[in-house]
Image (cartoon, coloured by chain):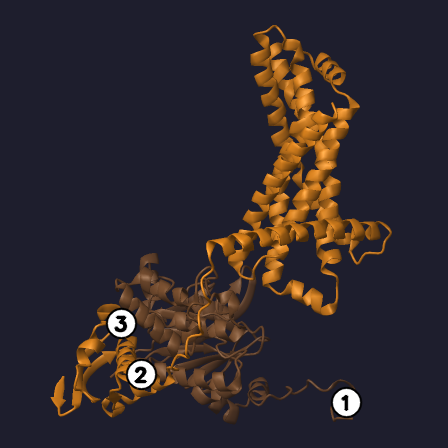
Chain colours: A orange, B brown
Amino acid sequence: MGVSGATSTITLSGDWVARVSGVDPRAAAQILRPGIGRLAFDAGGLGHWDSALIAFLANLREAANAAGVTIDEIGLPPHARRLLALMAPSAAKAPSLPGVSLVDRTGLAVIHAFEESSEVLAVVGNFCLRGAAALRGHASMRTSDLIICMFNAGAAALPIVTVVNLLVGGILAFIAATELRQFGASGYVASLVGVGMVREMAALMTAIIMAGRTGGAYAANIAAMQGDEEIDALRSFGIPVFDYLILPRILAMTAMMPVLYLYGCATGVVGGMAVAGATLNVTPTSFLVATQASLSITQLVLGFCKSIAFGLAISVVACRVGLRAGRSTDDVGKAATSAVVASIVGVLALDALFDLCANLLGI
Amino acid sequence: MNAGSMMPALKVEGLTVGFGETIVQHDISFEVAAGSIFAIMGGSGSGKSTLLKAMIGLLRPSAGSVRVGDEDYWVASAERRAEIDRRFGVLFQSGALWSSMTVAENVALPLRMLSTLDAQSINSLTRVKLSLVGLSDASDSMPAELSGGMNRRAGLARALALDPAILFLDEPSAGLDPITGKRLDDLILELRDGFGMTVVLVSHDLPSLFDICDDGIFLDAASKTVIANGAPKALRDGCDNSTVHAFMRRERPLGDLDPQGVDHEPR
């Protein structure tokens, strides 16, 4: 760097390649020493250059402007000057919002939770109203959509429901066989499997499978539609989003869950029967007779009601999570995760509530 | 300064591209001179973006070769192809920003992953790239918060991250207002003239094609091959092919008459 009076001439030489040399952030401060009023350039020896040179010059220009130093760009390569000119000066930063205190954050979280609960209740209310309208044929829902949703939430889920309930029935029978044998109560294995499956496990396990399988898919699908502006397109035509998109999904899941529950009970008993046959030599007939004797219609109704409530809860939560998702692809993954977690927690909470009520009612 | 050598930056020979049994374009041959701005033109659905994918390594061609410098891209080993890829910068039609990162993080990621530069150098270079595309104030925004045009400009800043030797741009000016579009044209010219980049451009934007492109090819959807080559301006003024002529002058092709002779005069 040459200094003549208040003017410093910076000699640029050699190659300036970003991936090799990087950009030295201290260079501008080293050049702009006190007493310098004007900067000029001599680029006669400059070799190959890329954005490393532009970044250096931009840093220098910014620092020089702040220090009140004039920059004479005449000595720079013409293309470098034009690229510098293309770099729009950044606008003044918007004032940042004041920080939020812990108390305010807690308050906002409570308000948010309250609003979210209201929204979920609104979806349930909407479902009751629009579901009734759909039954009378007054909803803007396509029957083909409902059938596809019912297939996805019903027949398509049968393999996984079969496997899981068979295994759960078998596991119950195995535990019962090992434990009850010690007390000479092996005859109660069928009762334990039957009651366990019908009253609790078939509904619960099927609901957990459906939350992961179908609930997650609902949320991801609706969130992706949100990102692609498909939902905005529906709204722009005045097509009711709830009727078109949400209603078939909630109806399908709520209708299919009890069917899957009954199927789950049957497969669970079959699983238990197979394990009891293998470990205790119980014949299928005696197992089924013992199961039938231990079950009451009240227990079946309890499990059946649970499955309807679980289906409703999973679909409502999944659709709500999908609808409030952001617009990026990242938000699709977040929506699917939130829907599965919230649905499973909701199902377990509902199950506990059902059991509490059943206990109070002496069922 | 950044004088290009005599060897073409890219040489495509007898290239056939398609998906499975479907051939999109066949027997395509052309050369892209180093330091030139080369246009791939053609109507919608003519396979411009598919050809681009074969040139940047995203779609293996059914036949033919793509030579980058003196190397055959599709014959080279995976490691060599990765080396060549680092000399490419690609702007995708939608911007294709990584949605979980801010705009600045999008631009900085290739530098972080593929260079040994320190954080301050990466920050400086990221700021320069964003400033060049006029997005310095959106550096902390998430892609979902940007408009379509801003997304594409951020995509361009990311394509410039590694100072590529060859810049591939798929519809860079689609959805931009005329002023921003002109600014983008100026930027492409300066990147070529200043950094010595070679630019391959897929575009429908006729004013931009006429202004900045030195050479190009015209792909035809019907015959599935190149039907004209040359600078867009020269094709506009001197090409006899009726499809190219109609495209370049925004006219209805011969034989594509108005249905029932309906005229469109205002009532």
Crowd class of label 2 (few under 14; some 14 to 19; many from 20; radius 10 Å): many
Instruction: Kindly identify the amino acid type of the residue bearing the numbered disc 2.
Output: Gly
Which of the 4 image quadrants contains residue A79?
bottom left
Which residue is the site of mark 2? B194
Taking the image as drawn, is residue B69 in sight? no
Which numbered tag is attached to residue A315?
Answer: none
- Depth check, mark 3 against mark 1: the one in front is 3
Which residue is the site of mark 1? B261
Mark 2 touching mark 3, by CB under 8 A?
no
Mark 1 or mark 2, which has the lower sequence index?
A: 2
Q: Do labels 2 and 3 share a chain?
A: no
Residue drawn at 59 percent across, 54 percent down: A112
Q: Is residue A137 positioned above or below B81 on the image?
A: above
Horizontal side, residue A71 vs residue B104: left or right: left
Which residue is the site of mark 3? A18
Q: Is residue B130 positioned above or below A169 on the image?
A: below
Q: Nearer the viewer, residue B258 or A247?
A: A247
- Picture coordinates of residue A329, whole percent (x, y): 53, 59
- Marks 2 and 3, how far apart at CA: 14 Å
- Depth check, mark 1 against mark 2: the one in front is 2
Instruction: Kindly identify the amino acid type of the residue bearing the numbered disc 3.
Output: Ala
Which of the 4 image quadrants contains residue A278?
top right
Taking the image as drawn, is residue B95 in sight? yes
Mark 2 — on which chain does it sit? B
Horizontal side, residue A321 vs residue A3: left or right: right
- Picture coordinates of residue B80, whole percent (x, y): 31, 61
Mark 1 touching mark 2, by CB under 8 A?
no
Q: Which of B36 and A63 is in front in this view?
A: A63
